């Protein structure tokens, strides 16, 4: 397995808006190459928007996003898609499409004009299915899959696209704990074995702390903290970004910081 | 991953995809045979039936003058027009429904055909134009409606019911405008006016067919070029963008191609009701696998138009009925069924 070349994806003074509603203003971020970056923050803080801006789905209102020093808008669609891929939050599948066919569509940026499928495409598609444990599901229609299987199929499609930088918008939403871990393990394997740079938005702070090399905490459209889990996951930052009173202890499994929320009825000194 | 495992795991991908492709090919062959049978029947039947031997002799140029007239001046022009517009409506419907991710969003339902029809009726009845200019005028009418719908529904996003409902409004306006034009213009027969309202193959001429064929050849080629990108758009705008598609530009290109297909067909056959609406869903139900099924949609479209023309011309009691009335009778129950089951979570077409 060849190791991915490292690319630098950066945003400078980036502002993003939907119509006239500004979501992100004047934001700077550099994605560390070859690492797993997790973006966390409370609802509507602009996490998904930032991801969409980095993936060239949203055009910046001002500022720019660069890949290897070049404005991402100067890349051709295909060239960019071979380096950066995104798995959006709620992708749609046409009725009746099989898993194999869905995953094979990820090969599009590597194909010529009429989308002719080569044996190389078949090979990469098969690898993507195997890596996500979807080989058995190859001939099943996507709508017949369970939530976890479906998410794996979509990740397989993103793998078939074979980008060096993979962005994922809440890849664990709607999954139970087992499947959440399965998906995150898969992504970590991808990062460690192939060197794929992974950037994802996650809701669960503890999973973020466990799987991230680099955490970006967002609040109200700006970055309030970023760095390694140890530096970032502190009671002060959690309180500032989420308005949550919590203690941070060591995760007994891997030693990563673990957030234990306090809440209204617990955590106060024992009643007299 | 070792090469051994990847070689072993490669088999299902190839097999599964080949299986889907095979089904599409078989469907295309079967539909083609069916279409050939319909064409043969259409050539032989009518007020002046031609037996197989007379048919062959006439085709070889050895029939009587009267037989030759029936075949070459009356029947074949209609059949060729039916093939062309059926295919155009079938593909236009498939493009619209896929692009807008809504089975109701076909050009006949959302007033695109209506716009084309109004412009065509205006061109013929008031301006007296024909040929390529008529096609262009029809396209102008259709694109005006498409642009108006897009503008009015811009805030709600271009998929969803808002778009469809605004389109349905335009379809009604178009109906009224055609009604007005037919009372103002010099229309001697009610059946001629009916062509602009419901559509049909009556009065087809070779010269017109040539214009239609040339225009559609260009549009089908364009469709083949944009089809791979539409296949990516089926996965949602964000996923398509992630795969390197310029979403807005691609949507616009496909929309213009689909509008043009509708306009060219409508300029010469009227807005044959529901052909665009039913063809792609029928084709996709047979092919399956989430494929675009553009060629099967074209074949189904041609079959539907020709069968409707046959039924209207021969089976219904009374005078010959335009194909559009027959397709209206077939299409309406499907529309009702779609509306009745609309709130169930349906996947995008």
Image: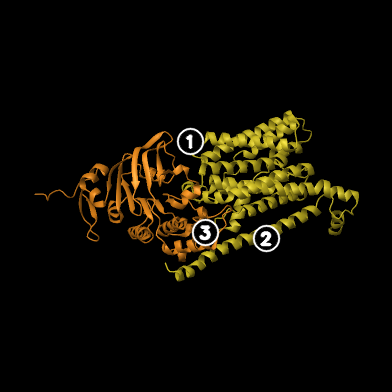
Chain colours: A orange, B yellow
What secondary structure is marked by label 1? Answer: helix
Q: Are marks 2 and 3 on the same chain?
A: no
Q: Check the image and name the residue furthest to the front.
A: A69
| Relative to A268, residue A102 above or below | below
Instruction: Say which of B278 and A234 sits in front.
Output: A234
| Contact (Cβ within 8 Å) of mark 1 with mark 2 | no
The numbered mark 1 sits on a residue in which chain? B
Instruction: Say which of A73 and B308 sits in front.
Output: A73
Dot 3 crowding, Cα within 10 Å, few <14, some 14–19, many 20+:
many
What secondary structure is marked by label 2? Answer: helix
| Relative to A20, residue A190 above or below | below
C-alpha separation, residue under disc 3 versus residue under disc 1:
33 Å
Circle number at residue A101: 3
Q: Are marks 3 and 1 on the same chain?
A: no
Q: Check the image and name the residue furthest to the top.
A: B184
The numbered mark 2 sits on a residue in which chain? B
Dot 2 crowding, Cα within 10 Å, few <14, some 14–19, many 20+:
some
Asked whether residue B160 is in view, the answer is no
Mark 1 or 2 closer to N-term?
2
Residue A151, position in %: x, y? 42, 56
| Relative to A225, residue A115 above or below | below
Horizontally, residue B64 falls left or right of residue A198, namely right
C-alpha separation, residue under disc 2 versus residue under disc 3:
23 Å
- Residue drawn at point x = 74 percent, y = 50 percent: B311
Circle number at residue B155: 1
Horizontally, residue A265 falls left or right of residue B311, namely left
Horizontally, residue B159 falls left or right of residue A204, namely right
Q: Are marks 1 and 2 on the same chain?
A: yes
What secondary structure is marked by label 3? Answer: helix
Residue B341, position in %: x, y? 53, 49
Instruction: Say which of B191 and A189 sits in front.
Output: A189
Circle number at residue B30: 2
């Amino acid at each position: 397995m060849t190791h991915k070349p490292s690319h630098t994806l950066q945003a400078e003074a980036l502002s993003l808006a939907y119509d006239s509603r500004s979501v992100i203003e004047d934001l700077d971020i550099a994605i560390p190459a070859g690492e797993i970056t997790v973006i966390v923050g409370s609802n509507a803080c602009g996490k998904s928007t930032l991801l969409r801006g980095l993936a060239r789905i949203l055009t910046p209102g001002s500022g720019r996003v660069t890949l290897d020093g070049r404005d991402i808008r100067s890349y051709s669609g295909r060239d960019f898609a071979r380096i950066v891929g995104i798995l959006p939050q709620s992708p749609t599948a046409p009725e009746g499409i099989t898993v194999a066919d869905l995953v094979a569509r990820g090969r599009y940026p590597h194909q010529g004009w009429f989308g002719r499928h080569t044996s190389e495409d078949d090979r990469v598609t098969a690898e993507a299915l195997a890596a996500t444990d979807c080989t058995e599901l190859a001939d099943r229609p996507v709508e017949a899959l369970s939530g976890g299987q479906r998410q794996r199929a979509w990740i397989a499609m993103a793998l078939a696209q074979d980008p060096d930088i993979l962005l994922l918008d809440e890849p664990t939403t709607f999954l139970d704990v087992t499947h959440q871990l399965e998906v995150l393990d898969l992504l970590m394997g991808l990062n460690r074995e192939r060197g794929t740079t992974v950037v994802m938005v996650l809701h669960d702070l503890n999973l973020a702390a466990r799987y991230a090399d680099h955490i970006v905490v967002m609040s109200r459209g700006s970055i309030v903290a970023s760095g390694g889990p140890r530096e970032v996951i502190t009671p002060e930052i959690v309180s500032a970004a989420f308005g949550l009173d919590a203690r941070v202890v060591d995760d007994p499994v891997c030693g990563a910081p673990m957030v234990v929320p306090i809440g209204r009825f617990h955590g106060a000194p024992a009643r007299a | 991953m070792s090469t051994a495992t990847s070689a072993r795991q490669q088999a299902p991908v190839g097999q599964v995809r080949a299986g889907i492709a095979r089904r599409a090919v078989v469907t295309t062959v079967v539909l083609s045979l069916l279409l050939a049978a319909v064409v043969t029947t259409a050539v032989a039947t009518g007020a002046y039936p031609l037996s197989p031997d007379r048919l062959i002799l006439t085709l070889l140029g050895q029939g009587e003058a009267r037989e030759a007239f029936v075949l070459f001046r009356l029947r074949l022009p209609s059949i060729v027009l039916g093939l062309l517009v059926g295919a155009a409506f079938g593909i236009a419907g498939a493009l619209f429904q896929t692009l807008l991710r809504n089975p109701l969003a076909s050009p006949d339902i959302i007033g695109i055909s209506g716009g084309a029809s109004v412009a065509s009726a205006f061109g013929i009845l008031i301006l007296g134009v024909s040929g390529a200019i008529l096609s262009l005028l029809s396209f102008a009418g259709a694109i005006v409606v498409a642009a108006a719908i897009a503008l009015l529904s811009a805030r709600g996003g271009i998929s969803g019911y808002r778009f469809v409902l605004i389109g349905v409004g335009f379809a009604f306006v178009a109906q009224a405008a055609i009604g007005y034009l037919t009372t103002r213009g010099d229309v001697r027969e009610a059946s001629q006016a009916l062509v602009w309202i419901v559509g049909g193959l009556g009065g087809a001429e070779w010269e017109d067919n040539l214009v239609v064929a040339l225009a559609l050849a260009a549009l089908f080629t364009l469709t083949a070029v944009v089809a791979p990108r539409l296949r990516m758009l089926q996965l949602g705008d964000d996923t398509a963008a992630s795969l390197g598609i310029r979403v807005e530009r691609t949507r616009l290109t496909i929309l213009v191609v689909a509008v043009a297909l509708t306009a060219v067909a409508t300029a010469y056959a009227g807005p044959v009701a529901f052909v665009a609406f039913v063809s792609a869903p029928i084709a996709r139900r047979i092919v399956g696998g989430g494929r675009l099924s553009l060629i099967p949609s074209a074949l189904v479209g041609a079959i539907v138009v020709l069968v409707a023309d046959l039924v209207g011309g021969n089976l219904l009691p009374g005078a010959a009925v335009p194909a559009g009335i027959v397709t209206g009778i077939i299409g309406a129950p499907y529309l009702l069924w779609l509306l009745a089951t609309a709130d169930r979570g349906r996947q995008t077409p």
